[in-house]
Image (spheres, grey):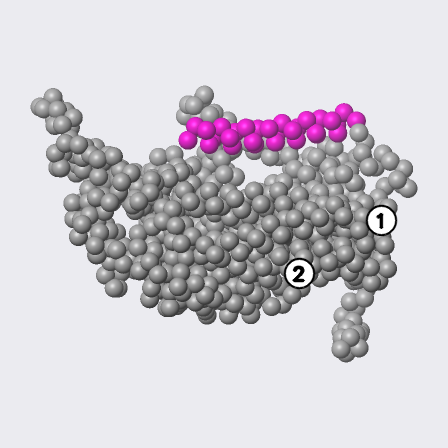
Amino acid sequence: MNYPVWDVPVIGSGWVIGIIAIYHTLISQFAVGGGLYLVLVEQKALREGRADWLPRLKQHSKFFLIVTGVFGAVSGVGIWFAIGLANPESTSTLIHNFVFGWAMEWVFFIVELTAAAVYYYTWDRIPRKLHVQVGWLYAIASFCTLVIINGILTFMLTPGDAWIEVAGTGNESSRFWEAFFNPTYFPSLFLRILICISLAGVWALVSYSRIDEHTDKETKAELITWSSKWLIPAFVLMPFFFVWYLFSIPEVNRGLLQLGISTIGSGAFTQVTRISLVMVMTTATIVGVVYFFARKSPQDFSFSHGVAVLMLAFLANASAEYVREMMRKPYSIARHMYSNGIRQASVAKINQDGYLTKSHWTRPATGSETSPDVVLAKGEAMFRGQCLACHTATGYRAINKYLKGREYASIKMLVTTLHEYAEDSPYRKYMPQLAGKEDEIAALVDYLDYSVNKEKSRIAQLMPTHKQEVVELK
Amino acid sequence: MSKLMSSLYGWVDERLGLEELVKFAKKKTVPQHQHSFWYYWGGISLFFFIVQSLTGLLLLVYYRPGPDAYESVRQITYEIQFGWLIRSAHAWSANLMVAAVFIHMFSVYFMKAYRYPREFGWWTGMVLLVLCLLFGFSGYLLPMDELSYFATKVGLEIPAALPAVGPWIANLFRGGLEVSEQTVQRFFALHVVLLPMLFIPFLFIHLWLVQKHGNATIPSEMEKPEYLRRSIPFFPNFLMKDLALWLIALNVMSLLASIFPWEIGEPADALKPAPTGIHPEWYYMSAFQMLKVLGNVFPGALGEGLGITIFTLGLILWFFIPLYDGKHENGVKARNATYFGLLALFILIATTAWGYMVL
């Protein structure tokens, strides 16, 4: 535990990343697909002499610039803040490994942001051909950002055998390309390209829904119809790429998707299956809504229809990102680093030397090693270091809820199971191994017991206040 | 391909007269005004009923009434593939259906769509509402877990409070003096045989009446000259919008079923004390709370009897409102009917909220 723990009550630190990331991907994927959309519509309008399209396209490019350049860029920085605070150890590993990847991505970002601004501000000011070229520059630069970030994101789920061989040796960046073009790189890239293209269509529907159907009836109908076609490739090809992606990930991760088919038992990750169903349902609904409203009566496509499609896309995107993140459990970097920042290879050493001895940010507990205050302080430090990355005390994935009704012996058995981490333990699918010396593990048991059972807990019986009360009662 | 389709359509049309139906549907129009949104709630209620029928049918495959009731629902929820989804969809769409039916009823009431010649539409609708509430009540007990057991026990206090016949009705429902396996068996028969047998014919009459008389135009629109009133064809315009709303309803229900699946509690145990804060389902809360309050003000049988009498009188008035305000005139009677509706709505919401606050 080389870093302080970021304790976010109720929702937990993971959801801070999640909320920002879901919001960000809805925009950043639009930034990639939307660039291609703008330049292709402009070319089509010029080729077919549709002068009435161009003012509308200019308006759309302003909308595009504001949404992607302001909200997209700001939320992208937000992700950096959030991952640095919530998961510093994993962030550090990624930076050490992919520093040049990110350097390249930021170059493309600068080109992308500049080209987007130039594209909008030079409408009707530079020759059409040059304007289209600026559009292409934007489209290519933004596509390159996707090509790069996709390598880093997929690495976390499937780092590949070549990288795992050198993991922890300090030589990790020597396998940069193997890690980058990891087993899920291509299926994920194609899936994301499809998402980007369909989001370009979805956001364009929102933008054009503002066109007045009384004054510009025909233009509105044409642009709405044309934009709705951008959703077709995704709906035709997505199932195939999705299956390809599923079969590229290790069976153990894929297994998480199946946990919730037959049960809703809590605390067993069954929600991954349920959220996948939400993804399928909302995606299918987008098809229905776009067909009924955008294709059947494009001139009547209202702003509320556009927002409804966007909200559905938001839900589909949120569910997909959630499922993707969950499938990586119990790791933040598969087969290397657990979601609480502990390296898999270090567990044996931690079990021998202790977890808290390396925790520089934990206040040393004073007093006798067995006094209840010290035990609880140690237990709390263990809880914060190893549990808080995924659980909260009383909010999201609340420890107090999961352990409700369990007494000391039962909690001890569960914690021991997580510590021993037997080959056939069902928890291996989604929970990291609990690391620490025996006294630290025992302290965690007492801390959890005390959190759930308060004065009925084992440790409370040993507290001086409790003894005092017993004497008084006598 | 299209040639083949059209010749196939021609073949079927010749025998079934589909074209007549299409012509009829195209001729039919639906008024279009600022309150048109409320026209869709009947359709949404119907959609949830269809979901109920389909999911209910699937649950019937695994559900076992009687002593095995709890175990079979536990298996559906925790062992059978997608059993939890079907059960959650059934439970959520039941609640959404009751909510949609209430919204439909109040919107019909305030748009004065019960007036001549739609009185029978209103009356059949009221019968359907009562049947719908009985569906909810009988279905709630079927898992036979702690909560459903005690909630049914408490819920049966409402009919039991009826003067003279009350205890007899309660015993008939229970199949004895206590809620038991016998009750589950009876509720099951009620839920899957008797109620559908009554519900479906009434539903058809209700829908036929809607087709026959069409959607009512609201009084403020009726005051406008004919050429200023707008309308849209039922087919395909209204139907398309209806289907789109069904899609939204399906999404809302699926989201709720997936994110908040219906759990099952501990098995019912008559010897255990009732959990604290036990109460019937939300749509019975108003009646439950009113009985409780009147029971406190007038202790004993008097309070309960008074409560039930007031409640029954209110229902009779509500049922016969088309006979009081049946003409298309905006006079004193129309105003009184609106005030009565507002009062009923206020009492329903206030007592329900009150009931939850004092739990």
Question: Is residue A269 visible in the rendered structure shown here?
Answer: no
Quadrant of the rendered image containing residue A385: top left
| For the residues bearing labels 1 and 2, Cβ distance under 8 angstroms | no
Point out residue B279 in the picture as x, y percentages from the top left corner: 42, 37
In the image, which residues are magenta? B331-359
Residue B344: in magenta span: yes
Side (left or right) of A229 relative to A376: right
Q: Are marks 1 and 2 on the same chain?
A: yes
Left or right: residue A304 versus residue A155 is right
Q: Position of residue B309 (x, y in %)?
A: 54, 30
Q: Chain of mark 1?
A: A
Question: The residue under label 2 is which amino acid type?
Answer: Leu
Which residue lies under the disc numbered 2?
A231
State the residue at coordinates (14%, 24%): A469
State the quadrant of the N terminus of chain A: top left
Position of the C terminus of chain A, as image quadrant, is top left
Which amino acid type corresponds to the residue marked 1 in the rendered image?
Asp
Q: Which residue is mark 1?
A: A216
Q: Main secondary structure of the magenta part?
A: helix
* Chain on which label 2 sits: A
Q: Residue at x 48, y 50 (%)?
A: B259
Q: Is residue B10 visible?
A: yes
The answer to whether B44 is drawn above or below residue B359 in the figure is below
Q: Nearer the viewer, residue B340 or B13?
A: B13
